[in-house]
Amino acid sequence: MALRAALRQKCGLIGILSQPSSSGSHSRVSAVLVSQMRNNATSPKIKVDFNQSTGVAVLSMQSPPVNSLSLDFLTELCISVEKLEMDRACRGLIITSSLPKVFSAGLDILEMYGKSPERCGEFWRAVQEMWLKMYSSNMVTIAAINGSSPAGGCLLSLTCDYRIMSDNPRYSIGLNETLLGIVAPFGTDKNIIKNTHTCSN
Ligand SMILES: CC/C=C\CC(=O)SCCNC(=O)CCNC(=O)[C@H](O)C(C)(C)COP(=O)(O)OP(=O)(O)OC[C@H]1O[C@@H](n2cnc3c(N)ncnc32)[C@H](O)[C@@H]1OP(=O)(O)O
């Protein structure tokens, strides 16, 4: 009930949460901490509001123009989730966007062009770390999809236990990268139909 109330309060959406996450524990301190200093030099791409009384954290993506998943963004996202994961008081996590119209545009296309093999490796490891961390989280996770969410944005939402999307015909969601032969990680499609809901905004 507390999770439902927090969801209403933050997003004006209808909550549907009642089940605990069935995923396993995950408390490994990640190598992404190495990158934290670099991220601190720029304005934060992620904002976290943790409500101690409800045990629910709201993680807002705030990286204009479209919350694209760059290496820095993914690093910050993973660090934020990891910190919450280690806080036993935090039972639920809502991921949403602070930007109008866009939840996330998916992987940052600029990370996939003209980069060194080392940088590419680091980037794809960060992508993998993101979905593994989210998918194996002990917290109950909800994507409050308040804008378009193509490709990696859709993938991010699929790593959550539940998805609620604003019922707005201008917002699109889907794994459009499959047209290029890029396949989302196995397992993320399991609960999309069962646990995806829409609501008016
Ligand atoms: C397992 C692997 C999984 C996934 C692979 C991927 O994720 S590949 C990335 C695929 N992503 C896309 O195809 C999304 C493309 N973007 C869009 O469809 C639209 O931008 C979106 C998100 C619907 C928003 O539309 P809107 O009209 O609001 O913005 P606009 O298109 O004008 O974009 C604004 C600026 O953002 C830049 N941008 C958009 N998407 C990306 C991206 N993925 N990476 C980097 N940059 C992106 C766009 O170029 C604009 O830049 P500007 O300098 O202002 O021209």
Image: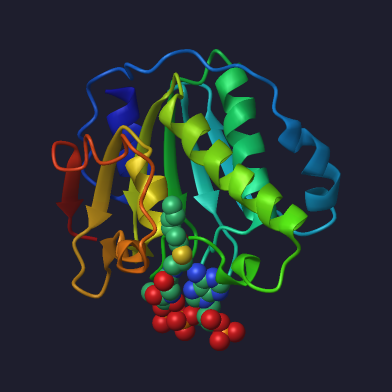
Name the residue located 26 percent from the left edge and 23 percent from the top edge.
Answer: 1
Residue 177: horizontal and vertical position, in percent? 36, 64
Image colouring: rainbow
Up/down of 132 relative to 55, above or below = below
Up/down of 54 relative to 35, above or below = above
Residue 124: horizontal and vertical position, in percent? 60, 49
Q: Is 185 or 100 nearer to us in this picture? A: 185
User: Is 186 left, or right, of 60 in this rendering?
Assistant: left
Task: Farthest residue to the left: give it.
Answer: 194
Asked if residue 104 shows in the view, the reply is no
Asked if residue 117 shows in the view, the reply is yes
Up/down of 198 relative to 194, above or below = below
Q: Quadrant of residue 7?
A: top left
Name the residue located 70 percent from the left edge and 28 percent from the top edge.
Answer: 30
Q: Is 172 or 96 nearer to us in this picture? A: 172
Residue 161: horizontal and vertical position, in percent? 31, 32
User: Is 86 left, or right, of 53 in this rendering?
Assistant: right
Q: Is 96 or 201 nearer to us in this picture? A: 96
Q: Quadrant of residue 186?
A: top left
Quadrant housing the C terminus: bottom left
Up/down of 196 relative to 97, above or below = above
Residue 185: horizontal and vertical position, in percent? 38, 42
User: Is 14 left, or right, of 24 in this rendering?
Assistant: left
